[in-house]
Amino acid sequence: MSTFSELIETFEPDTEILPPPHWFQGRTVYGGLTAALALRAAIRAAPLGLPPLRAAQVAFVGPASGALRFQARVLRQGKSSLSADVEASSDGEAALRALFVFAQPRASRIAHDFSQRPAVRPPAECPRLPMHELAPRFLGNFDVRLAGGSAPVSGAANPEFVAWVRHLDDNGVEPEVALVALADALPPAALASFTEMAPVSSIAWSFEMLAPPSARRWFLLRSFSQHAAHGCSVQDMEIWDESGQRVMAGRQSVALYQ
């Protein structure tokens, strides 16, 4: 059973890759893995000396269930930034389209962060996520500790999930790639409002990298459904490292089938 680091080590964007079954969620590959592979393809296509990842827009166009192939190209390279586009196909059909923006930090007198990290216990004091028979298979690649929020499919009025998450194996993987693969590990937050299990599917995901992440660490993930109507929810997603620094913020559109 290939680990995350083994997948990344052997990944060749122009060569078809057959997704391992233990990385699936339902009929498709876990979206965080597909996005991380797209980022790895963008990094491979860029020249040496690539600036840090700053922002991304990812569209999950279709199911990534068959042999995957990634095509990356540099759209523009300026003095301090670079934009890259990645298309992924599954058995020849469109599966993902992503835009990544890399940019050098610059000196500025303006600095503020009004986010508030949830008050939670450290990972060692939080209960491990029980592996329910209906849980998506990809969760077996992570260590997940429940830190707050609501329970899935509990009819909760508060559609929020909070958990500590870390890779079981991200040895040697670029920290940005590892974080993107981990960032989507929580279920869509609207699932907390469900009263019975039903399918959900990510449509689009945009995020900003706010600080360079560290490798092989715990990260605190929070997802909160800001709005749900007409079979679609919009959720805010935030990630903090163990020191309390917010390293990523994003938003995701999710299709709801209930």
Image: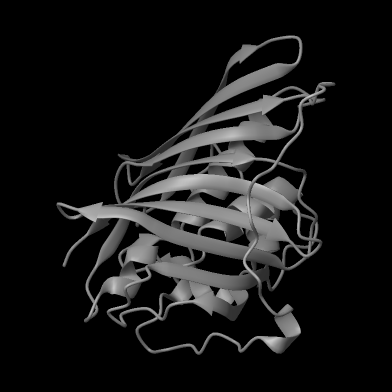
Q: Residue at x 41, y 75 (%)?
A: 136
Q: How many marks?
A: 0
- Outermost top residue: 79
Q: Quick check: 46 above or below 68? A: above
Tell me where residue 87 appears, x and y as whole percent.
Answer: 44, 33
Residue 22 visible in this rendered orientation of the protein? no
Tell me where residue 60 appears, x and y as whole percent.
Answer: 36, 44
Instruction: Give the colouring mode of the picture.
Output: one colour
Query: In front here: 152 or 130?
Result: 152
Q: Quick check: 121 above or below 41? A: below
Query: In front here: 102 or 28?
Result: 102
Tell me where residue 161 appears, x and y as whole percent.
Answer: 47, 70
Q: Quadrant of the N terminus?
A: bottom right
Q: Residue at x 37, y 58 (%)?
A: 225
Tell me where residue 131 appears, x and y as whole percent.
Answer: 48, 88
Would residue 220 be found to the left or right of residue 56 on screen? right
Q: Quadrant of the C terminus?
A: bottom left
Q: Residue at x 63, y 70 (%)?
A: 165
Q: Quadrant of residue 76?
A: top right
Would residue 113 be found to the left or right of residue 186 on screen? right
Q: Residue at x 32, y 77 (%)?
A: 156
Q: Quadrant of residue 77?
A: top right
Q: Quick check: 22 above or below 134? A: above
Q: Quick check: 123 above or below 169? A: below
Residue 160 visible in this rendered orientation of the protein? yes
Query: In front here: 207 or 154?
Result: 154
